Amino acid sequence: QLTGLQILDQARPELHPCPSSSCLLTHHKEADWPILPSYRVPRPLSHTLPRLLPTACNCSGHSEECMFDRELFRSSGHGGRCLRCRDHTAGPHCERCRENFYRWRPRTPCQPCDCHPAGSLRLQCNDSGTCICKPTVTGWKCDRCLPGFHSLSEGGCRPCTCNPAGSLGTCDPRSGRCPCKENVEGNLCDRCRPGTFSLQSHSPAGCSSCFCYGHSRACAAAARFREHHIVSDFRQGTMLSSLCPWNLLDSLAGAEGWRARSTGGPEHPAQWSPRGLLLDPEDKEDLTAPEKFLGDQRFSYGQPLTLTFRVPPRGSPVPARLRLEGAGLTSTLRRSSSPSPLDARQPGEVQLKFLLQETSEDVDLPLPPFHFQRLLTNLTALHIQASGHSARLSGPVFLTEVRLTSARRGLSPPASWVETCSCPTGYTGQFCESCALGYKRETPLGGPYASCVPCTCNQHGTCDPNTGICLCGHHTEGPSCEHCLPGFYGNPFTGQADDCQPCPCPGQSACVTIPESREVVCTHCPPGQRGWRCEICDDGSFGDPLGLSGAPQPCQLCQCSGNVDPNAVGNCDPLSGHCLRCLHNTTGVHCESCQEGFYGSALSPRPADRCVPCSCDQAGSVSEQRPCDPVTGQCSCLPHVTGRDCGHCSPGFYDLQPGRGCRSCKCHPLGSQGDQCHPKTGQCPCRPGVEGQACDRCQLGFFGFSIKGCRACRCSPLGAASAQCHENSTCVCRPGFVGYKCDLCQDNFFLTAGGTHCQECPSCYALVKKEAAKLKARLTLMEGWLQGSNCGRTWGPLDILQGEAPRGNVYQGHPLLQGAQEDFLEQVTGLEGAVKAAREQLQALSRNAHCAQARAEKTCVQLADLEAVLESSEEEILHAATILASLAIPQEGLGQPTNWSHLAIEARALAR
């Protein structure tokens, strides 16, 4: 069995174990070389040599298997490539750590890089195991955020957004939550905690505690306040000292009221020089501030008080303390920071700042926030303890400026540290420093710190907010308005405005209330008056001394006209003076009139002649209780009844009935001849043709109800359907009859032989009808001329009308037509003359008034003459129309009469 190289080819030459580090392999290709553990890889002596010298595997102790790699051999001269490297190694010889592993030294084991997948740029680290981090990421393994960043993710870390004014540093690198100052909250430390306000960067607590005099924990920054500085720069004496050597006056002016006291010594004005206040070089000095730094300094809470010193070159910081006194409290602050140079042009100046806040690290014995602010509201003393003595000082020390930051009303720069409070019920003011209306201090004169409680004034007024004393109204008095004022009565504890009422007594004098009945009784009535309220006069007198029933009236004697018994009691009412016991049938306020049922003079000298019975008619009077007037005897009559004794009806009334009176005649003003009717029946006197009890309608067969009565219709009994006509006097005709009175047959109709109805004419009568139409046309022409406006136009229609009239021989000789024809011609001739006269007058008026021929309308000035002419013409035409209406020319025999009624209607129309 072979223990050396195993030859895997067809020839299988003999293989000998390698006795040393060099072996020879012959006649074999690289692909045919086996992989053998613990044996060397053949090393070719030359690429042209057919035989190779075997070489041992170089795997750095991390593998026992290797193979020949031609490319590796060509590049490095060593062809052995190790396989299956152990211990996280890699490389041809397992000489290095594999990817994402590292080792400190060559012989140390490989360790995993463990680079954070989100924080590192790649997972491979360097030889020290340090990973390459993304921006904003840090750490050996890139597993945490840089300071100021948080929340490691694939995108790196997010920057912290902590509010610098409210946070104590950078945020938590994992959660991003910011570390907040004491009075600040929120993930970003960007808001004040409840009970605080005004986030400021220089404040150790971040936000200032609400003061509000202890009455509220809800506040916010007030608007319209600006930053203000209270300053002492000790320069007031500088101008005088520049003119002459400074003296005591300059010292007093320059010190600005600051006083000093050394240890154990008395207080004296501070030592001033043009460079400032000189500190005692031998001992500590206590400087006391003047008035402008004292008083109410609430607006300096949380703000700095800055001291500026001038020290020798290379001098050490000046030790200083600040002591505040006020409201029975004391607070001491040491210097809050190391001195800092102010300006290069002012070498040797340093500043010390004291933050006036309880959370300042400079406070020796911190006060609660409320008490510290309470101290500032009434600052009575401000002391600065400083010393000009120091082992490292080689010259004097001066205090050159004291600057206290405060606020006052204004806009810019804004002072956001001034609070405005949200006050609870009972408080008011910007700082809840006052009691609201209706509230008072629980402790009288307790000041703004005392609680406010409701006023106890029984709803009768308000109280003084500081003393609590009620300012009573509603006529009350007392510490709690629990009593009515003198002259008033009532129960003031119900809390109503009208609890106390004026005493109903003369002069509003004192009164009392009877508890059982609640009656008010006056206790001090004036002389001559009596009653529970002094409201009545003594017997025999009357009046209204209190004005209970109107204006006050003094008491006076009653006046009863001698009709009472002077010896009787209660003859008159003590309030009104009305007589109550009248004699001799008299009555009235003063017994000045007769009783009901009597009349006469109650003041007659003889009692028997004073009042007599009324004797009123029972049917016409109102009642028996008051039948007549007590003076005139006139009885009280029923409606529309007259007479002293009410015995008959008034004019225009009738039918007297007991208990009802008389009824109105109601005679019609047009149909009656008067307004009086029969006193019994009520029939009114009617005008002709009028009927009815009130004469309010026409009789049957009458029309035209007017002030002249009614006119007879005169309807033809033969042709009318009824004896009653219309209001225009026209009758209702039977078929075939026409005319106002229905006494004519209509055109082409004739009265039958029996005279009972109208029968239609034969057709031959059409010629007559045609002639009638011509006549109607002529009348229309006449109407048009009369209505025309041409004053100069000649008139001819009447001639035409007359010429076109039915020829005289047509009905000539008929005995019935002779008189009618003559009458008709006479009327037409008269009409012609009247119209011609009107024409001539119109022409004359036209010439006189200069009527224009070319104008559509003309105006004639002689209107009076024209009106007279037209009235005359109207009368003539109306008269002719009446004749035409009554004119009928019958034919001979059974022919139809010529009816002129329609011509009469035309004539009336023309007259209008």
Image (cartoon, rainbow, N blue to C red):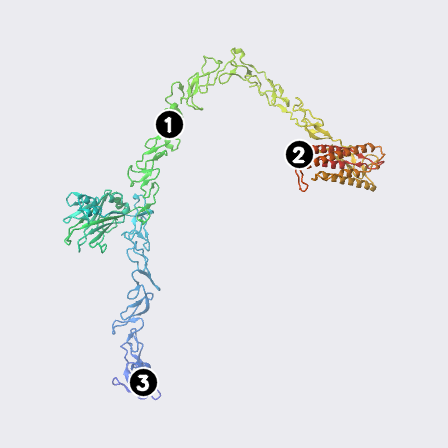
Q: Position of residue 65 (x, y in %)?
A: 30, 79
In front here: 244 or 597?
244
The reply to whether discs 2 and 3 touch (Cβ–Cβ < 8 Å) is no
For residue 225, above or below residue 29:
above
The reply to whether discs 1 and 3 touch (Cβ–Cβ < 8 Å) is no
Residue under pointer 2: 863
The reply to whether discs 1 and 2 touch (Cβ–Cβ < 8 Å) is no
In front here: 317 or 482?
317
Element on which disc 3 rests: loop
Q: Nearer the viewer, mark 1 or mark 3?
A: 1
Q: Position of residue 35 (x, y in %)?
A: 32, 81
Q: Amino acid at mark 3?
A: Gln
Q: Is residue 132 visible?
A: yes
Residue under pointer 3: 6
Q: Residue at x 41, y 23 (%)?
A: 546
Residue under pointer 1: 488
- 1 or 3: tag closer to the N-terminus: 3
Element on which disc 2 rests: helix
Is residue 747 left or right of 708 when viewed as pictured? Answer: right
Q: Nearer the viewer, mark 2 or mark 3?
A: 2
In front here: 140 or 289?
289
Element on which disc 1 rests: strand
Q: CA distance from mark 1 to mark 3?
A: 142 Å
